[in-house]
Image (cartoon, coloured by chain):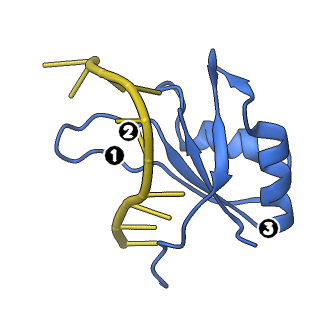
Chain colours: A blue, B yellow
Amino acid sequence: MLNKLFVRNLPFALNETDLSNLFSAVGVVRSVKIPLDHETNRKRGFAFVEMQTAQEAARAIEHLHNSSVEGRQLYVEYAKDRSIAA
DNA sequence: GTTGAGCGTT
């Protein structure tokens, strides 16, 4: 199981801190990342959230997927492995 | 300041 989550359909008003606060309600948030479009400087409206364990990631999906945030519904799923080992 | 389907960087 993965502990990384892919969150799409984000309200543009949300940032990494807001996501971190949302996901820490169901588990420990390791990291939150919101890539920007460097060609247009627009927000892409999606983010990646990494939980401490896959168990908490699963719980985050159960609690935050399809939940209303800022008038929008979040789409929380498992993310692909694209992280580069640092 | 910008927009609405989607899987990113250090």
Chain holding disc 3: A
Q: Residues within 10 Å of mark 3 (few under 14, many from 20)?
A: some
- Tag on residue A18? none
Looking at numbered disc 3 in the image, what kind of residue is underneath it? Answer: Ala
Q: Is residue A56 left or right of residue A86?
A: right
User: How far across and how far down the image is residue A82, in percent?
Assistant: 47, 72
Q: Distance of mark 2 from mark 1, alpha carbons? A: 6 Å
Looking at numbered disc 2 in the image, what kind of residue is underneath it? Answer: Arg
Q: Is residue A27 visible?
A: no
| Element type at mark 2 | loop
Picture quadrant where residue A14 is located: top right
Q: Distance of mark 3 from mark 1, alpha carbons? A: 26 Å
Residue ID at (59%, 61%): A79
Picture quadrant where residue B8 is located: bottom left
Q: Are marks 2 and 1 in contact (CB under 8 Å)?
A: yes
- Tag on residue A54? 3
Looking at numbered disc 1 in the image, what kind of residue is underneath it? Answer: Leu
Quadrant of the image containing the N terminus of chain A? bottom right
Q: Residues within 10 Å of mark 2 (few under 14, many from 20)?
A: some
Q: Counting residues from the N terminus, which is met first, the one under dot 2 or under dot 1?
A: 1
| Element type at mark 1 | loop
Q: Nearer the viewer, mark 2 or mark 1?
A: 2
Q: Nearer the viewer, mark 3 or mark 1?
A: 3
The residue that mark 1 highlights is A36
| Element type at mark 3 | helix
Q: Is residue A19 visible?
A: yes
Marks 2 and 1 on same chain: yes
The residue that mark 2 highlights is A44
